[in-house]
Image (tube, grey):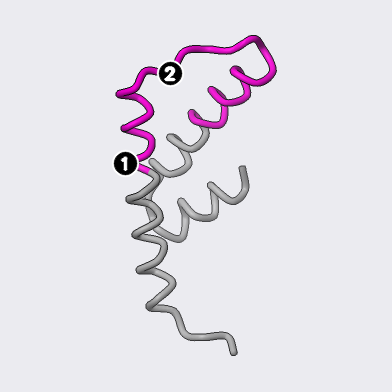
Amino acid sequence: MKILEKLSEILNDKDIEIIGDRMRKKRNLDLYEGGIIISQKEVKDYLDFIKQVIKRTEEYLKNQKSLF
């Protein structure tokens, strides 16, 4: 969870933490409590969101000075 919090802070986007937590809770419900059904639309929305976050993270990292 700390990773989502930090990424949300770095990219200045609370949705990363909120949506990431929602995804984590659904995964845990599925794994540990007998499962839930996630619609195809929901999967597509999550995947699109993750792709967007990855793209923004890559852009952020490209603009950072190298540590080495």
Is residue 15 or residue 45 the one in the foreground? 45
- The amino acid pointed to by label 1 is Asp
Q: Is residue 17 magenta?
A: no
Q: Is residue 39 magenta?
A: yes
23 lies above or below 10: above
Residue 30 location, x and y as percent?
59, 18
How far separated are the C-alphas under marks 1 and 2?
15 Å
Which residues fall within the magenta stretch?
A: 22-49
- The amino acid pointed to by label 2 is Ile
List the single residue furthest toward the top.
34
Residue at the disc numbered 1: 48
| Dominant secondary structure of the residues highlighted in magenta in the image | helix
Residue at the disc numbered 2: 38
What's the residue at 41%, 61% (across, down)? 57
Q: Is residue 31 left or right of residue 47?
A: right
Total marks drawn? 2
Dot 1 alpha-carbon crowd within 10 angstroms: few under 14, some 14 to 19, many 20 or more: few
Which of the image's four quarters has the C terminus?
bottom right
Is residue 66 or residue 38 the one in the foreground? 38
Is residue 52 or residue 6 the one in the foreground? 52
What's the residue at 47%, 85% (across, down)? 65
List the single residue furthest toward the right.
32
